Image (cartoon, rainbow, N blue to C red):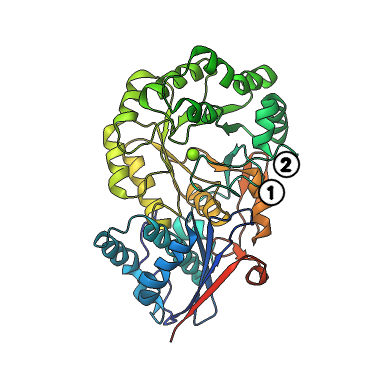
Amino acid sequence: MTAVALTSGSFGSSDATIESIEGWALGAGSSLPGLLLIRITDSRGLSGTGETHYVPEACWASIEALFAPRLLGRTLSDLGSFFAESLSALRRLVGMGAEYRALSAVDVALWDLAARSDGVPLRRFLNNDSSDAVTVYNSCVGPSYTSTARVPGDGNFDLTDPRDDYAAWMSDAGALAHELVDLGFSAMKLWPFDALAKRVGGEVPTADQLEEACRPLRQIRDAVGDQIDIMIDGHGLWTPAGAVAVAEACSVFKVRWIEDLVLAHPLDGLRTLRANTDLPILASEYLASVEEYSELLEAKVADIVMIDPTWAGGISHGMRLAGMAAEGGLNVSYHDCTGPVTLLAGATMASAIPNHDIQELARGLFNYAYPDLVDWDCVLRDGRLHLGDAPGLGIEIKADLSERQGISYRRLDRR
Ligand SMILES: [Mg+2]
């Protein structure tokens, strides 16, 4: 059975109340300057952790203005209606941007708190038959990928950093593929057409330009054959005609999916792409509302549905959207590349739903950037993320994070 909403019983029979909300905006100079981590603590001292990404100051301002007044002092058993009433409020103030990302962060923290109240891992709280590990693919980036990103698709790389998978596939994708196969990965994602898209404004490139952009794909197939699946991300940078040309160029490499070559909203671009390629199409982490996903599913223009838990409504809607995809016969994949809570929230839901495809995991962030921010008990081994047995998400914000230079720490207390 799959729970899709927090209910009055989710927090047990406790009459504990929400006492504080803390926020950490990591700021310029950090590896993840777009990240806002939050923690919600109750009168028993139990906490839940959440996060969201992009414009963290606006997201914190939304928490302070819109959600803290609805949360502080409120009894846990009264929180069953919190998400629905908050979403209803956002609908009436045109709040489906930073405000909705903030609500997504809060929702993840409340689910974490609910599972901790019950003393069980969140995946078992969602589904008692959840699995303990999920298969992941490596999104090929380095520790500094989001250090300069203002929007998706502007990721950074460091050619001098041997840990940087983005730099690695740009110089020799075959060597990187070898390494990943040896580590047990079954799939890898890269975006070899992004630079070209920016150069040609997303319009149809020349055959020579496409041939050159395909070099990493050739290197992978030459090095390891079909031992690893390849996913291509386009970060929504192509026009429909440009996307069709890129898809055609990809088809000889038998890629596992093409992702966001065009933006998924409006749907015209995906309709054009669907009509002109047989490659599996994934869409899209850039959608947020249930209505947007509903239109995507009704249009039948995607084969796999990507969901970002901390942009698209937290656990509450991350589970609901997966259920909607299942009704349409589609699998889902949850997004990584923006922060540790997003990754664990996605992997947790992935382990609890029947229609999971494969979880995104950026090992350049997982191995180096995320452990600088949080403690957790999950382990990456043999191409799978093994989830720990700690209650809730099993994640704790580092105790010294508030005191670190450049980090903005805020705390709101019940008055
Ligand atoms: Mg993507």
Question: What crowding class fits label 2: few (fewer than 14 Cα within 10 Å), some (14-19), or many (20 or more)?
Answer: some
Quarter placement of the C terminus: bottom left
Q: Residue at x 41, y 51 (%)?
A: 318
All told, the count of numbered labels is 2
Q: Give the mark nearer the N terminus: 1 vs 2.
A: 2
User: Amino acid under label 1?
Assistant: Asn
Q: CA distance from mark 1 to mark 2?
A: 9 Å
Residue 43 relative to residue 371: left or right:
left
* Residue 279 location, quadrant: top left
- Give the labeled residue for mark 2: 163
Q: Residue at x 43, y 81 (%)?
A: 17
Helix, strand, or loop for circle 2? Answer: loop
Q: Which mark is residue 242?
A: none
Q: Is residue 278 above or below residue 340?
A: above
Which is nearer the eye, 97 or 354? Answer: 97
Which is nearer the eye, 57 or 297? Answer: 57
Q: Residue at x 43, y 35 (%)?
A: 236
Q: Which mark is residue 367?
A: 1
Q: Residue at x 62, y 18 (%)?
A: 218
Within 8 Å of ligand 1, the CB of disc 2?
Answer: no
The answer to whether any part of residue 3 appears in the image is no
Question: What crowding class fits label 1: few (fewer than 14 Cα within 10 Å), some (14-19), or many (20 or more)?
Answer: some
- Kindly report which numbered mark, 1 or 2, lies closer to the viewer in this rendering: 2
Q: Is residue 292 above or below residue 238?
A: below
Query: Mark 1 touching mark 2, by CB under 8 A?
Result: yes
User: Amino acid under label 2?
Assistant: Arg
